[in-house]
Amino acid sequence: MTERYDCHYCKESLFGKKYVLREENPYCVKCYESLYSNTCEECKKPIGCNSRDLSYKDHHWHEDCFHCFQCKRSLVDKPFSTKDEQLLCTECYSNEYSSKCQECKKTIMPGSRKMEHKGNSWHETCFTCQRCQQPIGTKSFIPKDNHNYCVPCYEKQFAMQCVHCKKPITTGGVTYHDQPWHKDCFLCTGCKQQLSGQRFASRDDFAYCLNCFCNLYAKKCASCTIPISGMYKFSNSCISAKYCAVLTNHTSMDSLFIQMYKSQF
């Protein structure tokens, strides 16, 4: 006697009929589609055993229903995008939602690399330095007058140059006699100490720190030999009637001291 081979769900005989195995249990086509078939997102009908089931992010479509929401062209085996859970071919998505390149005014296609700055977008190959026309890519750049410059070109074209080393001043500097200097280049003529942020004196257009200027040019007290300047207070032991006339007639060096002005470039 032949063993019965029935549908696991409805128990009807499957002899001579199509059936589907699921977890090693046989189902007639009707029961399988009723129990396990996915519903198509487009037509809302079950996707039967004889249909190709296309899925994306837990959603399912019949092969004929898997098309662009706008132009209705099939998206089977083609790249596509989604917007508000609607399928769109790349062309429709680009025309509707993609950014336009600030330089060439063409659409920046989905999946292509783009550069963004202050709400504007560029193709990677269109985002170039205004001066050398080379792509900037991920390198540092400086915007000026609605144009973008790579750092070397900006320094060559716009940055002030230090009077001493002739190199561009990019982060900060000082002015002396209306000329720009790097802070590291503005040094005492005598001891080469940095003068940035300090009081200094000048003679014949050369800058000196207080100590060097006093040692080189100031008169010295006849009693203690300390240079006489507006920065020193003399003790009573240094001053006698013999030197009163000298001290009274001496012009204070305060008139020679200059306060340096800082300037950000």
Image: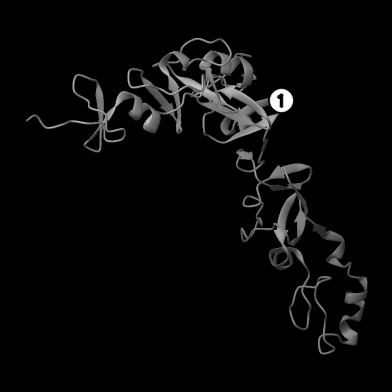
On the image, the x and y values in percent for residue 235 come to 82, 86
- Picture quadrant where residue 126 is located: top right
185 versus 241 height, above or below = above
On the image, the x and y values in percent for residue 218 come to 77, 67
Furthest-left residue in this view:
1
Please say which color scheme the image uses.
one colour
> Which residue shows up at 76% across the image and 54% down it?
203
> Which residue shows up at 92% across the image and 71% down it?
249
Q: Can the viewer see residue 128?
A: no
Q: In this view, does 251 lie to the left or right of 263?
A: right
Please give the count of numbered marks on the rendered protein: 1
Q: In this view, does 1 lie to the left or right of 40?
A: left
> Which of these two is toward me, 198 or 264?
264
Furthest-front residue in this view:
1
On the image, the x and y values in percent for residue 217 come to 75, 63
> Which of these two is toward me, 123 or 19?
19
Q: In this view, does 231 lie to the left or right of 116?
A: right
- How would you rate the neighbour count of disc 1 (Cα within 10 Å): few for under 14, some for 14-19, many for 20 or more? few
> Which residue shows up at 61% across the image and 58% down it?
192
Q: Is mark 1 on a helix, strand or loop?
A: loop
> Which of these two is toward me, 139 or 25?
25
- Picture quadrant where residue 251 is located: bottom right
Q: Can the viewer see residue 210?
A: yes
> Which of these two is toward me, 38 or 193?
38
Q: Is residue 170 left or right of residue 205?
A: left
Q: Which residue is denoted by mark 1 in the rendering?
A: 146
> Which residue shows up at 36% across the image and 19% down it?
52
Q: In which quarter of the image is the N terminus?
A: top left
225 versus 104 height, above or below = below
Instruction: Give the amino acid type for the residue marked by disc 1 in the picture.
Output: Asn
Q: Quadrant of the C terminus?
A: top right
